Image: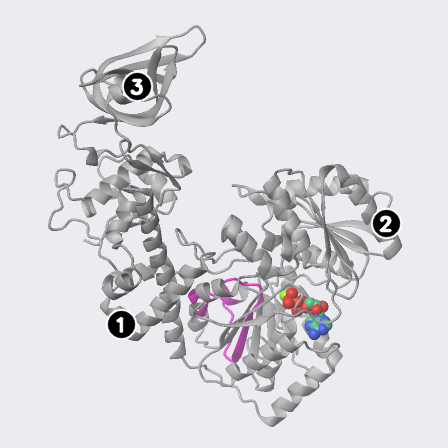
Amino acid sequence: MEIEKILIDKLPATSSITTHKLKSLGINSYFDLLNYFPTRYEDYSIVSKINRIQVGEVVTIIGKIIEAKNQYTRSRITIQKIVISDDTGVVEVNWFNQPYLIRVFKIGEMVSVSGIVKQFGAKISIDPKEYEIIFDRSNDQKNLKHTGKIVPIYSEKRGLSTKTVRDKIFFILNSVVGDDPRVVPVGHDGPTLRDPLPPSIIKFNHLIDEDEAYKQIHFPDSLEMADKARERLAFDELFNLQLANNLVKKEWKKERVGNVFKVETRHALSLQDFIANLPFKLTSDQTKVIDEIISDLKKTTPMNRFLQGDVGSGKTIVATIACYLSYLNGYQSIFMAPTEILAQQHFQSISKLFERVGIKPTPTIKLITGSTKKLNSVETGHAPSLQKNQYDIIIGTHALLSKKTKFNKVGLVVIDEQHRFGVEQRALLKEKSLNPHILTMTATPIPRTVALTLYGELDLSYIEEMPAGRQIIKTFLVPKEKRTNGYEWIKKQIKENKSQVFIVCPLIEESENETMKSLKAVRSEFEKLKKIFSDVKTRHALSLLHGRMKSIEKNKVMDDFKNKKIDILVSTPVVEVGIDIPDATVMLIEGADRFGLAQLHQLRGRVGRSNRQSYCLLFTENTSEKTISRLKYFCKNNLGTKLAEFDLKNRGAGNIFGVEQHGFVNLKIANLGDFEMIEKTKKAVEYFMEKYDVKDWGELKIRLKKFETKQISKD
Ligand code: ADP
Ligand code: MG
């Protein structure tokens, strides 16, 4: 039976507690467990005769237990003194405070102990790291799992000990790829692990076989073999991810949009008119992307475009122009944002844009968020009706998709600040029998190579240049002792330059009641700041904003801030995405060390959105050299992609995308910073697509399943 189909409940001699712990880590099958990779190894491979051991060495000795007793000391420490003998001598092994060991070590049994050889006075003893009782009389070293070889160390999550994980993985490996029939007889129906890759790809890329890779990643013959194994498994992971994306893309190319766009001369003229009347001149990147979008919209296959542009680069207007074209064609557009605040803001700014440009007739725009009461009940009187599809642009949170809203004239869906547009969302639209054009946008800076890997099913567009006249945001790292100076400087900015200030409170590390803790932290910080800034009396000095506030309150605070009724907005990182307050010029980030650089960059991007000089102050209590150098790097660099690459190299992918952000494919072993491997696997995928049909590769198909469930971003 395929190893993917054997559930861990089938593991022999395994307590339900262990099974439960494994499941809580998402490990459900034998195969999942094989993919629980060690974080490092300990080398216990030097097996020595007792008379040969030398002080300072890490060795494994194998021998018979000839003595085992507890020794009590005057302090409360107990010593478990075990004496082991082999055919060359005897040696003492001492454990501390584990009296139960005396029951484990039975006189006369064989034992293998790995540890460091120590000298106490004239006596040599072993400071043990690992041990295992040898039940197997054959005394075959191959059957050792915790000693006598290079052993894997796993991260001990959910109280799962390395020893337990090692034990279970050893069992699975033996039952699948083991050649020792005594450990587990491989029957006719035993678990099977078939190499999913065509031999030609394995050969061309000098990869080791997959079963060998699984064996070597857990119990390597040498560290070089562990590297080889890692390479093979990382290859598979990146190959599978890209192949899955490619197959999705191929499927999508077969689809047809429900509502085909025309761009007739009169439409083109209206668009030109609209663009000419904007309060600013589009940057050439904006124009380029608009052209790419328009050429997509003219096609009968649905657009699946992913627009990446740094914070403040002006993505909203690009999407708005696409919505306008949809309107000119008589179709609706749905514009989704991840938060209510952002949806509200888009509603206001897009409405204003159309008013300002003075298009007649102006498209009708509707805002729908979670706090909009029952959808139907708001449709009264002579207002255009949602049900009758009379609104041209419908703006809201992702709730728009899950609501029982019926749309049938949708030509375009815009999804703002989304990091992964999933197959599932497409499916949701399809359930509503919609197959519109889709534009996804993000400011999360993802290096191009990485974006191509992660989002291979989408077409990518980039805005790389900022609107003219923008100034570089001056960023400073404020150490603990300069905190007061920092506050004084802000007061001066408010008084003398009428600056508006964001203060973002620290992110609370992931925990059970994360939101409540963050809330408490931000509230107490708010009280503290109120005192500090009590002498600022220009306007209503301080207001608080957090995700748990009612949306009516949130909107009021945002409006007041926008209308300059508030000097300082104290907030949780809810302002991270998308908020556009062009007049705010100072951003203070508390606990800056707790954010990834990409997130810091997002926060910094809340200022510097006009031609005024803006500032970003990073407060941190952390004095570790690594943190300081990371934050200093941030101070000196303004390019999102640069920062993302830095994070990718130094902290891993999780920090680009932010732990709290959904929808990111969690790579277990591949490193997205390894561009060479990305390139290699990309070529292999192209070769596969040309030469083979996935239908003929059953095992590969099973592996690809993992990528089918791409998540939906939640509000
Ligand atoms: P983001 O790409 O981060 O979503 P926005 O679309 O919110 O950025 O745009 C940021 C600000 O820049 C907005 O106030 C917008 O009106 C303004 N803006 C957009 N394009 C231009 C441009 N070409 N010239 C000047 N200002 C622009
Ligand atoms: Mg935006």
User: Residue placed farthest to the left in the image?
Assistant: 188
Residue 128 seen in this snapshot: no
Q: Earlier in the sequence, mark 2 or mark 1?
A: 2
Which three-letter amino acid code belongs to the residue tagged 2?
Lys
Residue under circle 2?
Answer: 492
Residue under circle 1?
Answer: 692
> How far from the left and from the top, in percent, is residue 233?
33, 54
Residue 595 seen in this snapshot: yes
Q: Which of 226/658 is in front?
A: 226
Q: Which of marks 2 and 3 is nearer the N terminus?
A: 3
Asked whether 246 falls inside the magenta stretch, the response is no
Q: Do the residues labelled 3 and 1 touch (CB within 8 Å)?
A: no
Q: Which numbered marker is on residue 101?
A: 3
Q: Is the residue 124 above or below the residue 529 in the image?
A: above
Q: Give the range drawn in magenta.
A: 401-426
Q: Are marks 2 and 1 in contact (CB under 8 Å)?
A: no
The image quarter in which residue 127 lies: top left
Which three-letter amino acid code belongs to the residue tagged 3?
Leu
Q: Which numbered marker is on residue 280?
A: none
User: Residue placed farthest to the bottom in the image?
Assistant: 265
Residue drawn where x is 66% and y is 88% of the image: 270
Q: Is the residue 671 above or below the residue 97 in the image?
A: below
> How far from the left and from the top, in percent, is residue 403?
51, 65
Residue drawn where x is 55% and y is 58% of the image: 715
Q: Which of 18/179 is in front?
A: 179
Asked whether 415 falls inside the magenta stretch, the response is yes
Residue drawn where x is 40% and y is 51% of the image: 668
The image quarter in which residue 20 lies: top left
